[in-house]
Image (cartoon, grey):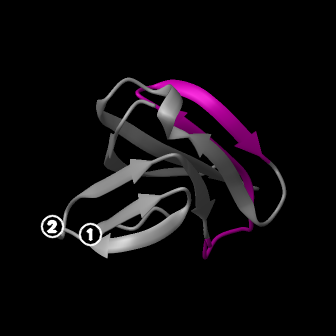
Amino acid sequence: MKPQTGVAYVNDQSVAEIAPNSVQAVGDLTVIVRATDNAAPISQVRILVDGEGRARSDAVPFSWKWRTGEESTGNHLLEVRMTDQKGNENSASVTVATLAQ
């Protein structure tokens, strides 16, 4: 999944390595989800920020452009929820520090 922990991004480009469990973003950030499943193909990916649905995709590759500058300055929970064709669900999340522009 992009963003990766331990990386600072400015306008969608990785610019520095930072603390291993941190993500920092300024400007736009393309969220990329690489999801696989042993039971069945992934049929849907939902992307949430602070619990609010922001994007849904039914087509590979799963991606969304996050305009992080529109968020308040501080930490935000980026969560990805994946559903396979059999209805099984899984999720992954990362906290991203943003700087409002």
Amino acid type assigned to the residue bearing label 1 in the image: Gly
Lateral position of residue 12 relative to residue 96, left or right: right
Q: In this view, does 44 lie above or below 67?
A: below
Q: Residue at x 40, y 27 (%)?
A: 50
Q: Kindly identify the residue that appears in the image at 68 percent across and 37 percent down.
A: 55
Please, what is the three-letter code of the amino acid marked with disc 2? Ala
Q: Can the viewer see residue 83?
A: yes
Q: Where residue 100 appears, x then y in whole percent?
A: 40, 30
Classify residue 16 by image quadrant: bottom left
The mark nearer the N terminus, 2 or 1, is 1
Asked whether the beta carbons under mark 2 and mark 1 sit within 8 Å of each other, the answer is yes
Residue at x-position 71% and y-position 59%: 62
Q: Which mark is residue 19?
A: 2
Q: Nearer the viewer, residue 100 or 82?
A: 100
Residue 95 is situated, as x and y percent measured from the top left of the image, at 30, 46
Q: Mark 1 points at which residue?
A: 6
Rendered view: 40 above or below 86 = below
- SS at circle 2: loop
* Span shown in magenta: 36-57
Quick one: 31 or 27, which is closer to the camera? Answer: 27
Q: Is residue 93 visible?
A: no
Q: Is residue 67 left or right of residue 14?
A: right
Q: For label 2, count other residues whose C-alpha is less than 10 Å away and answer few (under 14), some (14-19) or many (20+).
A: few
**Residue furthest out toward the right:** 59
- Front residue of this view, candidates 88 and 66: 66
**Res 59 quadrant in image:** bottom right
